[in-house]
Amino acid sequence: MIIASDPLLSSDIGFSVVAVMLLKVVLAFALLMVSVMLVIWFERKIVADMHNRVGPSLAGPWGILQTLADGIKLFFKEDLLPERADRVVFRLAPYLSLVPAFLSFAIVPIGGDFTNGGDGTVSIFGHRTLLQVADPPVGILLFLALSSIAVYGVMLAGWSSGSKYPLLGSVRASAQMISYEAALGLSMATVFLSSGTLSTSGIVSGQATWNWNLVATGVIPFVIFVIAGTAELNRPPFDLVEAEQELVGGFHTEYSSIRFALFFLAEFMNMITMSAIAVTLFLGGPNGPILIKQIAWVWPILWFFLKVMAFLFTFVWLRATLPRLRYDQLMDLGWKLLIPASLGWFLLIASLNIGEDRGWSTFLVVPIGLVVLSLAALLLNGAIKKAKDSSLNAADLSEISEGMDQ
Amino acid sequence: METVVFLISAAVILSGALGVIFSKNPVHSALFMVQTLFGVAVLFVLLEATFLAAIQVIVYAGAIVILFVFVITLLGVDRAEDLKVEPISGQRPLAVVLGASIFGIILTVLIVAVGGPTGGQAANTPIGDATDNTRILGEALFSTQVFSVELTALLLTVAVVGAVVLSTRPTKPLISTLDEQQNDTLDDELEEKGGE
């Protein structure tokens, strides 16, 4: 059974191979837990700075242990179960959002030298292995599959609470996540076109010589990916799911104690994973210059973390800056702008690829493609305008006829 | 190894399928269906059809069943039902007979068919490099199967257009309750409004 192209698993699987595998799993788990702890602190500190506040400052130096203190506090709180809750599903839901958040980090390569023909492997106890837990041939599709499972966590948490605000929150959440998953997938598909593989290590090694997919796919898919990714994470400005002014706490209103902590954990884990996936797909993953040859293995890991940090800061920055979207604006942006734009760009890149294969002139393919795309955009725009007008007319007509009846 | 994985996933699939039928709450039924779909995805991985496994989870578990749950919770039909009531009398015995006969037919095909029901080659050997089944599937879909793909796409488009047509309200009542003259004055009024 071939489920991974990791050189570690191609040889005989003995005790030491299993040990290395276990070490990787434990390391990834610990890394994710610690970084969640630090990211929560990071977000609170940055937002406080942007608000001209001090932020957490008492637990540990600069308040860095605040998250740990909060976690311990939540752990000892009473765990409430609403009377009208669906007991089994209510208990299941936090794990349905936590487990995918953990698993999807497994496919991200966090280090390894891919430059100068390197295959990105490092040596651990005499075994060559990739610095990622799993490298399945369908790679990035696994991420999409897991993020579609994470919708269940949110959806069922709201439903099983047996109360109206959580239900409203979860209905909003599932509608939002399903709509933006399409744009997310389409912008990813452009990357698959330019790198010709689905495996994450393959995508990263295709970007080894500074030819990042950010440029190769023409920036637009990257922009769409970041917007759709923010919506997929339910982070501001797309946090209608837990709009405090309208829905109390959204889908997790009825959750308390450790179950609430699990949702909180999953949310920040998803934020880290989404940043890591964006870095892998568009920004060359761990690729970067190796400055000091003696500690060559450190540099890719360092570059990877710097790039992820840039994304995390952007997410926090967006939260502190932008006001929340209205529900109809959210749906308009998703369905009428992001999905058509990503689909159109996908077609353009595909026709460029075919043109290269057939030896057509790029100077002809690009203008013709752009003209066709703008024609399609005009048609779509016209159709949307017409639909809006006719629905307004229908509203007028029914108002007038109601007036006549009276 | 493969037998063990197969047995476990078969147990998962069958228990999920039974759960779909026997749960009283529609949401629980939908969740059991997700369990069944996951079991099938594991079987796909076992057959080295990794792409199909991923698509199975993304499309069926991630889109279709989510939509079921969405509709169930939104329409408020998520209450437990009494399973003892038969909506159509004699439905249950008939269902048993039908199920048994379908099972019999499938079993006969499996036993009698020469070289397996899907052809010996497809059943026993991979059609290409297993790590690259995304490419193989894509090539098959857009070369030998291109007409069926396009026809399916057309069918889906027709379905979408149909859904849109059904969901829009007609701007004028289908059976006019106002007479022609009144309608005309209405149109004039609207035009005047638009002119302003």
Image (tube, coloured by chain):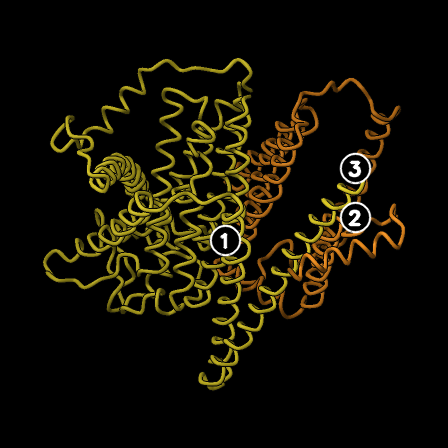
Chain colours: A yellow, B orange
Tags 1 and 2 on a common chain: no
Task: Find the distance from the CA under tag 2 to the CA under tag 3.
Answer: 74 Å
Tell me the kind of residue under disc 1: Leu
Percent position of residue A362, x then y: 45, 83
Mark 1 crowd level (few <14, some 14–19, many ≥20, 10 Å Cα): some
Question: Quadrant of residue A252 in the image?
Answer: top left
Task: Find the distance from the CA under tag 1 to the CA under tag 2.
Answer: 56 Å
Q: Residue at x 74, y 58 (%)?
A: B158
- Chain holding disc 2: B
Question: Is residue A313 among what the camera can see?
Answer: yes
Tags 2 and 3 on a common chain: no
SS state under label 2: helix
Q: Residue at x 77, y 51 (%)?
A: B170
Task: Find the distance from the CA under tag 1 to the CA under tag 3.
Answer: 40 Å
Tell me the kind of residue under disc 3: Gln
User: To which residue does mark 2 refer?
Assistant: B112
Does residue A24 sit above or below A211 in this rendering? above
Question: Is residue A359 among what the camera can see?
Answer: no
User: To which residue does mark 1 refer?
Assistant: A333
User: To which residue does mark 3 refer?
Assistant: A406
Tell me the kind of residue under disc 2: Val
- Chain holding disc 3: A
Q: Residue at x 31, y 19 (%)?
A: A75
Percent position of residue B24, x then y: 68, 22
Question: Residue B140 or A279: which is nearer the viewer?
Answer: A279
Q: Is residue A312 left or right of residue A236?
A: left
- Chain holding disc 1: A
SS state under label 1: helix
